[in-house]
Amino acid sequence: MPLDLAGRKVLVVGLAKSGVSAAKLVAVRGGRVTATDRRAPTELADALRALEGLPVSFALGGHDERDFVTSDLVVVSPGVPLALPEIQAARREGIPVLAEVELAYRSLPDVPLVAITGTNGKSTTTALAGAIFREDRRSFVGGNLGTPLCDLALSGRTVDVVVAELSSFQLEGIERLRPRVAALLNVTPDHLDRYASVSEYARAKARIFENQQPGDVALANARDPLTLELAASSRGEVWTFGPGAPAPRSVRDDGGSLVLSGTSAGPESYLIRSRSLRGRHNRENAMAAVACARLLGVPGAAVQRALDEFPGLPHRLELVSERGGVEWVNDSKATNVDSTQVGLAAFPAGRPSVVLILGGRGKKAPYAPLSGLFPGRVKALLTIGEDAPAVERELGGLAPTESCGDLARAVARAGAIAGKGDVVLLSPACASYDQFRNYEERGEAFRRLVSALPPP
């Protein structure tokens, strides 16, 4: 049943984009809204402007436990850990605590939901799946990727399918959210600054399957045993994707095409021809997106058309410039080691040609897994940000290394080091919060700094 918000006292915790959207939705639906954030009003100018004129009260500069334990409902933004003492106090009082995505889901009409999660690749897979669905039907694409789901509930738009990227943070706070197709792309160490262990992190990801029913689909990566184990918890039918020979209910990469097997139509083949989908990891993303779309009936011709026309995502292996024979590639969205691994692996080994910019605010994961990709590939390592000393300790002996401190100095040094046929790759393996508001701002700064370099 839809969530009745009229007259209820609702506390929205966190005023980033999702929190602002949730506060708007509750206010429009007749709830009595208080929004709380630890940041001061001077740091929340955009949020306060977005909520201007709505009946929303504010408790800023910190949290007051009384606001939590006297509410009828607490709605939590993704960046707010549920372990927060005030949230735990609310739960002890029996007060429901919901993620913004759960609030949105229970405020929407019944519409098929395709939900995609994983440590890496979920944004590209979500965007690509959304592009495929748009070839055939009215679609909303959002969640952790750009537009909060509450925006759809606010808009009143009629859509035929919702395609949502869901992070582990968002999945922590779901109760009834039920995807018709739920895809878990991979699980590798990440967010260990928030989770006590990889197992705890994986359990949060696995919640994507917990409300599925017979007739739904759980999609898992065939080369990742943990995703297969977690998908087996679904009441839906398990499908897989990955390299290797065709299998029942799967999409496989035979080295030339992507082959879907298991539908009544028989085996189907799809080609990857877009430069924006280069690299093994992007072929896996494409397999998952193809499965999501075909299993909900998008015609094969529409699938191939979208694969051919997909432009890629900003900040994910984005070619921002070619200057003097040097490619400058913005992979700012690589905020963990595994993501940098797949980004670096997209460039062939043979001769050292990659000038790699690495560093930022670390997530307590080791950088050593990158070491196997350095020989024959990395020409120089330029470090930035808080975790530069750790990066240098673990990787500094594998290529000429310079500590640059900030991105501006790193771009300038990369311009001096890179020659014709080289690639300058910003793939930080770290969060951006030590020097930037988010990875998007870091990527935009990289683009500006590259464009401001003197002509080669």
Image (cartoon, rainbow, N blue to C red):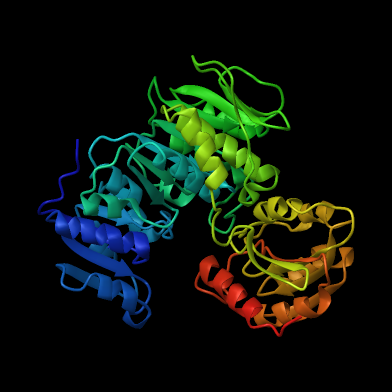
Where residue 121 appears, as percent x and y from the top left, is 58, 47
Residue most extreme to the bottom: 454
**Residue 453 image point, x, y percent:** 68, 82
- Residue in the picture at 65% in, 77% down: 450
Q: Residue at x 19, y 40 (%)?
A: 2
Q: Is residue 57 visible?
A: yes
Q: Is 415 displayed left or right of 447 in the figure?
A: right
Image x and y of residue 9, in percent: 16, 57
Does residue 186 appear anywhere in the picture? no
Closer-to-camera residue (130/331): 130
On screen, residue 401 above or below 364: below
**Residue 210 lies in quadrant:** top left
Position of 215 relative to 305 (above/below): above
Residue occupying image coordinates x 19% and y 52%: 72
Residue at 44% in and 23% down: 236
Q: Is residue 397 left or right of residue 40?
A: right
Q: Which percent across, then down, holds residue 402?
A: 81, 77
Quadrant the C terminus occupies: bottom right
Question: Is 281 placed left or right of 216 in the picture?
Answer: right
Residue 384 found in image quarter: bottom right
Left or right of 177 on screen, residue 52:
left
Q: Nearer the viewer, residue 10 or 166?
A: 166
- When asked about the image quadrant of residue 260, the answer is top right
Quarter of the N terminus within the rendering: top left
**Residue at far left of view:** 7
Residues 24 and 126: in front is 126
Picture layout, residue 408 above or below residue 320: below
Q: Nearer the viewer, residue 163 or 387?
A: 163
